Amino acid sequence: MTGQLRALWLAIRASYWFIPSVLTILAFLGGLGTLWIDRTTGTEWLEGVGVELARPEGARSQLTVIASAMISIASTVFAITIAAVVYASGNYGPRLLTNFMNDRGNQVSLGVFIATFVYNLTVLRAVQSAERLALAGLSPEEAAQGYVPQVSLLVSAGSVLLAVGVLVYFLHHVPASIRINSVLGGIGRRLLHDIEARFPEPGSHDAAAVRESGRPLPAERTGYVEIIDFATLDRIARSHGLRLALAIRTGDFLHPPRPMLFLLAGDVDPKVARRLHDCFSLGNSRTPTQDLEFLLDELVEIASRALSPGVNDPFTAITSMHWMAAALSALAGRDLGRGPEQDSYDPVRVQPLADDFAHFLRRSFGELRPSAATSAIAAKMFVDALAGILPAATGPARRNALMEEAQRFGCQVEQALSGPARAEVFERLQSILPAAASEARRPAGD
């Protein structure tokens, strides 16, 4: 249940409506607060500092104009955001839709405009004309000037300045955010950050290739694994004398009767089995939480689309490979023998389905290999990227994985390219990765 609540909280925080809703509530409470200040402090101190007091007609006009303008701008902002989202998902891939909907700049911009509208509407209700006050029973002298919450009106004017600044920021932010370099940079930097957080220690240790076998616990629900609550799994295993080995990782698609985990020691009754099932939060799509492969797949998707015949944009693919190479270089020098959130559980009692360097290499450059081999420009960058990762590899197994990937790429180029373009790629392979180049060009049957 903790994992499901955590997934719900992450989904709420990432939703397009959360920040605008919070800002709207704060604006309403702020309007009530400034009205309270007006009622308790009066206007004498404003006159003392030289502030010209507004009359009811002018105050009502100001608040009405601001409220009308803000709701119109909010509608325009929403329309621009949707247009940017449609453009980005169509050009870069539908999985990037979430990235733009979760963009904090878009959410805050929409929230500021709606909050300004709500604040001015709240204050507008408090403005009273002289006639209205006279009908309420006040004496002619008391009702003569009407009632205007002067402090609230000043804050209203300040909110316009804030909204104008946010509008200028939004008009700059939207075109900047859909630039492909900005998109790739955001994905790449988050990937590097997550690698640092998940694998903080340097080393050459990979996840164990051989895992213990046990009795499978099949899934009962269907969906993508969004979050695995390792801490609760550990508490259940410790309290019931269990040893568990996960059969899936975050981001995998789960359905009955696919095993969720294996019971290496101990047994469970239906109640405990239900608690174990609740440690896995499932949804309709993958998320980057606990899922490094999701971010790698986004880079691969953008590069593959860029290298498709209909797009033919090898330089976008090259930028994707730059970030992939940076991520693989970070992975090549780290201890990968651990799962996500390792500090919250005992890996002997709860064994995660961890991944070795070869797995991440296959999910990145291995998936991009067929597309990159069809473009002479991208093919040369592919070789350079592998060569750039090689010095960071801390063990022979990781260096061999890179050499094998280069060999496979050479075989792919042999079939996809011809003439001088193929010769240039193999020349680069020979100068940087000579063993891989010689293996790739070895005749069949040798």
Image: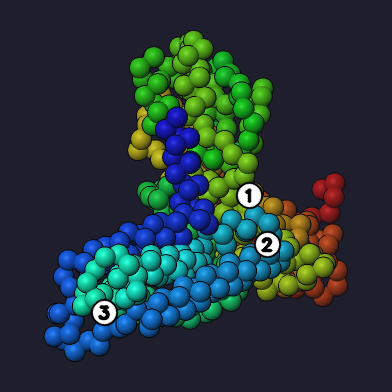
Please tell me how crowded label 1 is: few (under 14), some (14-19), or many (20+) other residues with Cα within 10 Å: some
Horizontally, is 252 left or right of 425 in the view?
A: left
Residue 303, visible in the rendered structure? no
* Nearer mark to the viewer, of 1 and 3: 3
Q: In this view, does 25 lie above or below 262?
A: below
Please tell me how crowded label 3 is: few (under 14), some (14-19), or many (20+) other residues with Cα within 10 Å: some
How far, Cα to Cα, is label 1 from label 2? 22 Å
How far, Cα to Cα, is label 3 from label 2? 60 Å
How far, Cα to Cα, is label 1 from label 3? 76 Å
The picture quadrant where one finds residue 300 is bottom right
Image coordinates for residue 416, horizontal then vertical, percent: 83, 62
Image coordinates for residue 95, horizontal then vertical, percent: 65, 55
Given contact means CB atoms under 8 Å apart, are the residues at marks 1 and 3 in contact? no
The picture quadrant where one finds residue 181 is bottom right
Colouring style: rainbow
Quickly name the residue at label 1. Answer: 363
Lower position in the chain sequence, tag 1 or tag 2: 2
- Residue lying at 30% horizontally and 64% vertically, measured from the top left: 136
Please identify the quadrant where the N terminus is shown.
top left
Q: Residue 144: which numbered mark, if any?
A: 3
Q: What residue type is labelled 1?
A: Arg
Q: In this view, does 286 lie above or below 431?
A: above
Q: How many labels does the image show?
A: 3
* Nearer mark to the viewer, of 3 and 2: 3
Q: Is residue 122 above or below residue 398?
A: below
Q: In this view, does 129 lie above or below 107?
A: below
- Residue lying at 13% horizontally and 85% vertically, measured from the top left: 48
Quickly name the residue at label 2. Answer: 89
Question: Which of 438/393 is in front?
Answer: 393
Residue 8, visible in the rendered structure? yes
